[in-house]
């Protein structure tokens, strides 16, 4: 089995607590700022801004929330419990850490700098800069090439089963991190090597993969009882 050299995390639902970022963070924020646009219009605008087709300033204005701003919105994000310690431990193991996220570059930069995540996560692959969103295969292909690490030596962590399948198809090892959003995005073909629900569990799973022992103490997957 190939040596594990890098771990690639999703942001929303893994590094940050809310996987359903539109439903739990963005839409409530917009409603507080006076946005009356239908939810389907908000979701369409979110897709456009996270694909780099419009700026964040134009996004707020188009939804009738011109008084909203990037900084105020980004303060709504919450870090998943245990993230700083988990990142420090994995970086201390000699693993390269990266993030692949469906997000707007301006928002991603504000949130990760607020939490000091760039200390350990060296590369950030953001959909608005790549021009493609997970689970489109294109963002996944960009990661091994940019890191200079073969896909077989990468562990990919996401809270959506549907987002794991393209990573697995490229030969990456995959770990499902259960979040509030996990049940809404099933994919019976994803078949993660492990399923975890906390940062300590994730660190242990990555270390098992690094030792060639992925699957030990494996949970029963997304359908398992809590």
Image (cartoon, rainbow, N blue to C red):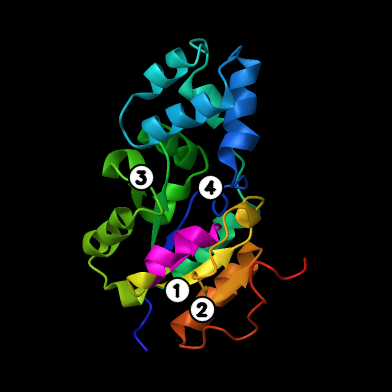
Say which quarter of the image contains residue 8: bottom left
Whole-number angstrom distance, CA of label 1 to CA of label 2: 9 Å
Q: Are marks 2 and 3 in contact (CB under 8 Å)?
A: no
Quadrant occupied by the N terminus = bottom left
Q: Are marks 1 and 4 in contact (CB under 8 Å)?
A: no
Q: Are marks 4 and 3 in contact (CB under 8 Å)?
A: no
For residue 218, side relative to residue 11 (left or right): right
Question: Which comes sooner in the sequence, label 4 or label 3?
Answer: 4
Q: Which residues are magenta?
A: 156-168
SS under mark 1: loop
Say which residue label 2 marks: 207
Look at discs 2 and 3 and give the one toward the viewer: 3
* Residue 178 included in the magenta stretch of the image: no
Question: Which comes sooner in the sequence, label 1 or label 2?
Answer: 1
SS under mark 2: helix
User: x, y (%) of residue 199?
Assistant: 61, 63
Look at discs 1 and 3 and give the one toward the viewer: 3
In the image, is residue 49 above or below residue 14?
A: above
Whole-number angstrom distance, CA of label 1 to CA of label 3: 25 Å
Whole-number angstrom distance, CA of label 4 to CA of label 2: 22 Å
Say which residue label 3 marks: 126
Say which residue label 1 marks: 93
Whole-number angstrom distance, CA of label 1 to CA of label 4: 24 Å
Write the residue at 67% across / 76% down.
220
SS under mark 4: loop
């Amino acid at each position: 089995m190939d040596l594990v050299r890098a771990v690639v995390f999703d942001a929303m639902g893994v590094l940050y607590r809310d996987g359903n970022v539109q439903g739990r963070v963005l839409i409530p924020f917009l409603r507080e700022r006076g946005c009356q646009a239908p939810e389907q219009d908000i979701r369409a605008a979110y897709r456009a801004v996270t694909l780099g087709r419009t700026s964040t300033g134009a996004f707020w204005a188009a939804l009738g929330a011109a008084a909203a701003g990037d900084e105020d919105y980004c303060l709504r994000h919450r870090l998943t419990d245990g993230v700083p310690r988990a990142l420090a431990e994995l970086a201390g193991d000699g693993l390269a850490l990266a993030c692949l996220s469906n997000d707007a570059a301006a928002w991603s930069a504000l949130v990760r700098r607020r939490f000091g995540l760039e200390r350990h996560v060296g590369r950030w692959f953001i959909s608005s800069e790549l021009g493609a969103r997970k689970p489109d295969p294109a963002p996944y292909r960009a990661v091994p090439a940019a890191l200079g690490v073969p896909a077989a030596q990468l562990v990919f962590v996401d809270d959506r089963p549907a987002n794991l399948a393209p990573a697995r198809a490229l030969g990456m090892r995959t770990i499902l991190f259960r979040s509030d959003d996990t049940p809404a995005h099933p994919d019976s073909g994803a078949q993660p090597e492990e399923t975890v629900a906390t940062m300590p569990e994730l660190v242990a799973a990555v270390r098992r993969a690094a030792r060639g022992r992925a699957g030990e103490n494996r949970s029963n997957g997304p359908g398992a009882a809590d």
